[in-house]
Amino acid sequence: MTEITPERGVVGKYGDFEGLRERAVALRREGLSLRQIADELGVRNKETLSRLVQGEPPAVWTRRPRAKDDLRDRARELRSKGRTYNEIQAELGCSKSSISLWVRDLPSPAPRRTPAEQRIRMNAGLARLRAAQDRERQATKRSAAVAVGKLSDRELFLVGVGLYWSEGTKDKPYRRTEVLQFINSDATMIQLYLRWLALLGVGADRLTLRVSIHESADVAAAERHWAQVVGVDASAFSKPTLKKHNPRTTRKNTADTYHGCLVIYVKQSADLYRRVEGAWYGIVLGADSAT
């Protein structure tokens, strides 16, 4: 059969293209589907059939119903009743972008709560969110703590060396101070450092303890705090070091939880200091060889 195109004047038994198009358009307007028109005219080429009915809308009965028509109608109904996007989404299970597209011509519902009530509701939601986040953080920390398990003496020694080299006093070429002196405001670090010293054979008789704190703080309360952390009587502390306040700075550590820092000085510790410094560089070399 000769192919049907607009460029060909005669198309076999069908005559010219325009004549065939007139028949196709008439059938289209009678409500026939494309398949029915194709059967009626004997046209099997989809492109040609499309050209024949170009510009003519399909019959209503041939249109496939859209899957979301019912959802759209229901969304508009709910919006008309004053429902919010969140409420419509919760009921219908569709996206907010679809809801917005469907109901954007409808007026927004009037606020159900006063601004004060909205703030209270928002703050309550934030409090619940933060509480959930805090529970998640604490669970992660507990899991990590359990995973560490009991430390061997070697592990405690290496941890203590790293701790001291991070926070302890170190010898400098311009200031020879080969002595163990550690200062920190974290009670857990102080306790770990003391356990490490005990592992090295350093007894309580070789320790000098003193508090370093701002002069405006409660010095006696700070000494009682650190005495409890260390497990000694507050009378065992040496004279505290008081730091003068700079009026040009704004201190944030002024609450009741501020206890300053505890300074731990080890007497006759020059040789021990050298061993610690050597162990630290051994850790560095060991880490390099591991890679």
Image (cartoon, rainbow, N blue to C red):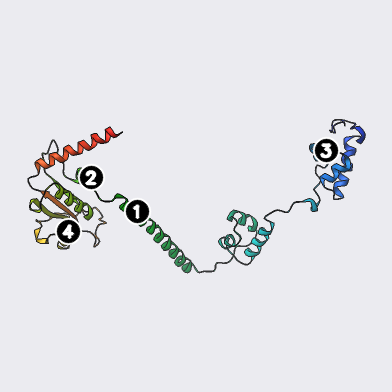
Q: Which residue is mark 4?
A: 226
Q: Do the residues under discs 3 and 1 have CB atoms within 8 angstroms? A: no
Q: Do the residues under discs 4 and 2 have CB atoms within 8 angstroms? A: no
Foreground: disc 2 or disc 3: 2
What's the CA distance linking mark 1 and mark 4? 29 Å
Q: Quadrant location of residue 186?
A: bottom left
The three-letter amino acid code for the residue at tag 2 is Glu
Q: Which residue is mark 3?
A: 44
Which SS class for mark 1? helix
Expressed as whole percent of the image width and height from the top left, the position of residue 125 reads 45, 63
Q: Quadrant location of residue 110?
A: bottom right
**In the image, is residue 72 above or below residue 177?**
below
At x 9%, y 40%, the residue is 271
- Pick whichever of labels 1 and 2 is earlier in the sequence: 1
Q: Which residue is mark 2?
A: 155
What's the CA distance linking mark 3 and mark 1? 70 Å
